[in-house]
Image (spheres, rainbow, N blue to C red):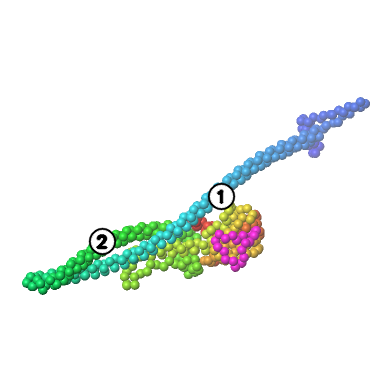
Amino acid sequence: MRTRLAIKTHALLERFFPERRLFLRSDTDTRFIRLRPETQAFAFAGSAVVVSWTIVATAILLMDSIGSGNFREQARREQITYQQRLNALSEERDKRAAEALAAQERFNAALRQISVMQSELLDSETRGRELATGIDVIQTTLRDTMKERETVAKRLAALEEDLQNGGTAVASAAAEGDSTMDFLSEALAQTAAERDKVVADAQAALIRAAEMQAEIEQMEEKNDRIFRQLEEAMTVSVKPLDKMFEKAGMDPDAILSQVRKGYSGQGGPLTPLSFSTRGEEPSADTTRANRILGEMDRLNLYRIAAQKAPFATPLKDAFRFTSGFGYRWGRLHAGTDFAAPHGTPIYATADGVVTHADWSSGYGRLVKIQHEFGIETRYAHMSKIRVKVGQRVSRGQRVGDMGNTGRSTGTHLHYEVRVGGKPVNPMIYIKAANDVF
């Protein structure tokens, strides 16, 4: 069976690969090498395998080269796009920072204007009370003058009646009544002078009263204009602050109540205008002024509260966000990462007291600051710490330098905000203050 199969195979191979002889000739001898069909078939198959392998390998290398070139080009394009995006974000951040500075300047200018208006309002109230007192005095003087005028008129009428009744006796006894006539004439002239003086005083008093009434009307118009300006300024200044605290998840009324309880040399609540001690209802201007003073007090409380809550950004130099708040790789990233050059200054975002300023495990060099309202901020991976435990710091005060200590993959600041010990997204506070500061 095998012999017959071998014969058929040999015959088949001999059709495609006939036996060949390779002659090797030398000077004295001639030899040959016989190439059997099986040998030729085996050599042909080996050559085909080598050629096929060479073609496939070359194709794979070409495809890999083309693919690698595409990947590198795509990576380069993505890198360029990412860099452009970072530049756009940096420009946007600088623009927002400039807008925040401008808003801060407008806010400070509004406060200065409000202070000036408050002084003018108090001066106007004082001047109004003085004018009201002056009008009361003039009215009293006018009433006394009218009474004196009536008394003088009665005396003059009595003298004229006495003169008429005594005219016949004087005519008959002229020699004896010369002294009486002189006395009557003198009294009559004195009475007429007093009457004229009283009339002139009354007219002057009426003119002065009219002038003072005109001054009061002008002052009331000026006060109304000042009131309107103050009310508009209060609306523009207070409402954004209300929204800022609400966006930060803080109850404005509760915050202001807490701040009001803790005044410590930073200015106290504004005192409302005094009410009448005679049981009279306050005037419309007094009620309006007290309402404005209440809004100014609220604005002052907001100013203090804004210094105690972390609404500021911990960096003032150029930076970029590298990682936000949230879960990543199955773990909570409890803060926001800011990247900048090594040694970039880091600033406190609110007034508070330093409770930790040392090395802390994965945080590296860490600073913790305790603020009002149960808020704590943390500044991690710093290269240098510039504050001590127990030190009281103000918003914007430098607390350290950016570094790469602890579990860190590069130079950056890991910034945390905790409320009641629980981490919250720091960007809530920073974004809430974008429209105000």
The foreground one among 112 and 235 is 112
Please give the name of the residue rendered at 52% of the width and 63% of the height, measured from the top-left corner: 308
Please give the name of the residue rendered at 50% of the width and 52% of the height, measured from the top-left corner: 99
Q: Label 2: which residue?
A: 207
Q: Amino acid at mark 1?
A: Ser
Q: Amino acid at mark 2?
A: Ile
Q: Which residues are magenta?
A: 382-400
Determine whether, in the image, residue 214 is placed left or right of residue 48.
left
Please give the name of the residue rendered at 64% of the width and 54% of the height, measured from the top-left corner: 342
Q: Residue furthest top?
A: 27
Image quadrant in which the N terminus is located: top right
Q: Is residue 276 above or below residue 121?
A: below
Quarter-wise, where is residue 72 in the image? top right
Quarter-wise, where is residue 51 in the image? top right
Q: Label 1: which residue?
A: 90
The foreground one among 272 and 99 is 272
Which element is circle 1 on? helix
Q: Is residue 354 above or below residue 316?
A: below
Q: Position of residue 143 (x, y in %)?
A: 24, 68
